[in-house]
Image (cartoon, grey):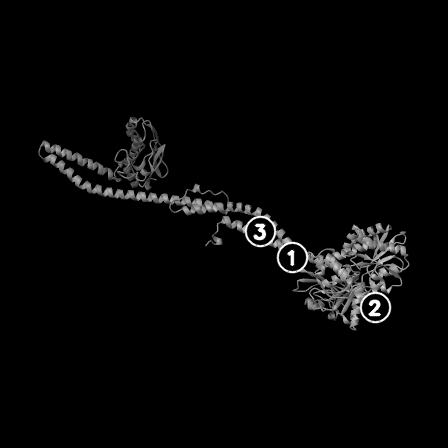
Amino acid sequence: MLRLRDLSFRYKIPLRGIVLALITAILVTTALLKQEYDDLRQDLITTSGHLARVLANTLVTPLVHDDVWRAFEIINSPFAAGSRENSPQTAELIMILDANRRVYLATDPKQYPMLSDPGRGNLDFYELWQAVEQLREFETRVVELPGSAKLYVVTPIVADGIGLGTLVIEYSKSAFLPRFFGIAKGAALAMLAALAILLPASWYWAQRFARPLTELATTMGRIGATIPDATEVKLYESRDEIGQLGAAFKAMLMGLRHKEALEKEVVYSERLAAIGRLSAGIAHEINNPLGGMLNAISTYRRHGSEDPLVGTTLSLLERGLMQIKDTVAALLVEAKVESHPLTRQDIEDTHTLVAPDGHRKSARFTWDNDVVETLPLPSTLVRQVLINLMLNAVQAIEPGGHVACHVYRDSSALHVVVSNNGSHILPERMDHLFEPFAPGRDAGHGLGLWVTYQIVSQLGGEISVDSAPDETRFAVVLPMPEQAA
Amino acid sequence: MLRRNFLLGAAAAALAGRAAGAPDNHAKDAVRIGLSPVFLDDQLAFLTSWRVYLQEHLERPIQLVQRRSYREIIDLLLAQKLEFAWICGYPFVKNRSELQLVAVPLSSGRPTYHSYLVVPAADRETRSILDLRGRVFAFSDPDSNSGFLYPNYALLQFAERPDVFFSKTFFTWGHRNTVEAIAAGLAHGGAVDSYVWDTLKLLRPQLTAQTRVAAISPAFGHTPFVARRDIVRGEWAALQQVLIGMRESRDGTMLLSKLNLDGFVPGSDALYEGIARMALAVRGIPLNAPAT
């Protein structure tokens, strides 16, 4: 079941607008009706008082002469001049009571026969007498009995100080109703006109107000499977609450993205570390028997027979074992190799070493070595990292491509940035880029990047890669050891 | 209904003031004819065309004079302010020495009419005036036969006096007013000229439908056109000829149909013997006539 609070703001706001407009209209109409009632009542009192005095004066002669018909014509004249339309100013009944307060004449003789007690036709009259008990000569009194739908105007008919009788004019309050309905109808029409304007306006405002909220709600709903891009959230810039909400939401999306990237990185480096441990373990296990086998061959050569066939076979064995040793050595990156600190010349040498490969591909080199002094970093390893990265770059470019290398230091680390404009690394390869023997390679066994990664890791540094169609850039940060920094 | 009556009454007063107000002594040669509510005297358009008709056929200027009561017309007549008048049989027999008969109208082919005892339509019981003891009763005019003399006479036959018999009586100064008073419920009964009631029944059926004729009197001589005694024969005979001749001409017939009359006949004094007897019988009886 759809509850009111479940409605979208798109409908809630116009609905609230209508309710407010309606309440206003009802209050205003009520005030108008109250005013109209008071006005009508005042008008009635004025005109009826006037009518009552005129009638009372005119009736003196017919009453003195007991000219019933003439008096009847006179009290009927207010009805005759106009009509019996339901105007609030039209009396319902005019009655003459004699000195004993019996009916002398009434415009409705069937209900109030001559000489009858008016109270028999209408119980109001008993209360009326109490209300006008002390009616003085020539005084016209308007009596509104509580609970009665009638209004009475009572005037004494007096000639020469002698009371001949009492004139009672009865008005129906219900005759006010058509006028009230008229006002209410007018108010309703004005209300409709106002709604005709208010409705589209509040609809528009509601849309404006609700759109960012709906947008936010939809985007938020998508979080989970993916993290929506912050640019997808189309919120207007402002400092109001919606603007603040949008800004906070964008910040949250960015935070989420950052966290996700971090998690990915952690998973990746853990995987590489596991592979590193595994390969190192295997390498050690292979190295021991391998060393034994090579020793055995060497011993045999020195002390064994001169059989040429054996010599050929041993050479074959030795080459194979040496190749295994090389591969295992490549896998087993040993950071604890003793080497001298890194000098500027060490870095320059790598340039020289790679240059012949570059020439073969007509590569354009941009070489930028900012390192001046000697740095407390193992030169062998740093050189290997540099050579690996540059050879990779040269390999990646088309003939005539561009390779750039920038080596510099800051207060805490050595930075090596190698970039090329060759074919860029596809995203699916990126996930396994640094793994050994990773699939999807065009050439090589892929140990270069693996070794580089191992070295950087063991030196406590970081390696990152950015690959765009026109530039692939590897950046290595190697922190300086504490004592030297 | 009250409204229409009021408007016509007001207009009639205006007309009386302008055209026929105080009988005009200066208008030489003018024949002044008094009209009383023995017929529906509020049809002003009709009165105008009737005056034109009489004027053309009499070849003399005519003034029609209307008053509220019969008494005022009789007084004007006796004071020589009128030459002729259409009055009731009762004042005619009372002032017979001063008046002479000119013509008598014919209703339903007869020069007679009745007094109707009229009660509200809702009253299904009343069969005679005796059933109205203690009720409110409306007379038309103290000088009316059908509207006053006859009901008094009828009560007298049972040794009743109206001021005691009824709880309240009043005059309406017109048969039509009596019908309206009864229809409105103001009076529980009234005595009405049969000619007026029958005519009203044609013209205002919705008014007469609210009333019922409970009893019908014997026939009386119809409301006479009379002349002063001193009017010379040539003069009244001329008017008599014009009135009687009305049913000969097309215009006259049309006017007569408006009046709901068949015509006028010379009539005879003998027609009014019945009224004269009743007038004699009620003489000396206090008849509860309010001061006017």
Q: Chain of mark 1?
A: A
Q: Check disc 2 and give the amino acid type.
A: Arg
Q: Which residue is mark 2?
A: B277
Horizontal relation, residue B161 to residue A35: left or right: right
Q: Nearer the viewer, mark 2 or mark 3?
A: 2
Of B97 and A356, which appears nearest the observer? B97
The spot of residue A128 in percent (x, y) is 70, 66
User: Cβ–Cβ below 8 Å for labels 1 and 2?
Assistant: no
Q: Nearer the viewer, mark 1 or mark 2?
A: 2
Residue nearest the observer in this picture, B273 or A341: B273
Mark 1 and mark 3 in contact? Answer it, CB < 8 Å.
Answer: no
**In front: label 1 or label 3:** 1
Residues packed near mark 3 inside 10 Å, few (<14), some (14 to 19) or many (20 plus): some
State left or right for residue B226 relative to residue B116: right
Q: Which residue is mark 3?
A: A21
Mark 1 is surrounded, within 10 Å at the Cα level, by few (under 14), some (14 to 19) or many (20 or more) other residues, namely: some
Q: Is residue A99 above or below residue A326?
A: below
Residue A1, how many percent across, how many down? 45, 54
Q: Position of residue B151 (x, y in %)?
A: 78, 67
The residue carrying mark 1 is: A177
Which chain is mark 2 on?
B
Residue situated in front as seen by the camera: B186 or A480: B186
Contact between labelled residues 3 and 2, with CB atoms less than 8 Å apart: no
Residue A118 seen in this snapshot: yes
Where is residue B286, by image quadrant?
bottom right
Q: How far apart are the alpha carbons under marks 2 and 3?
A: 86 Å
Q: Secondary structure at mark 2?
A: helix
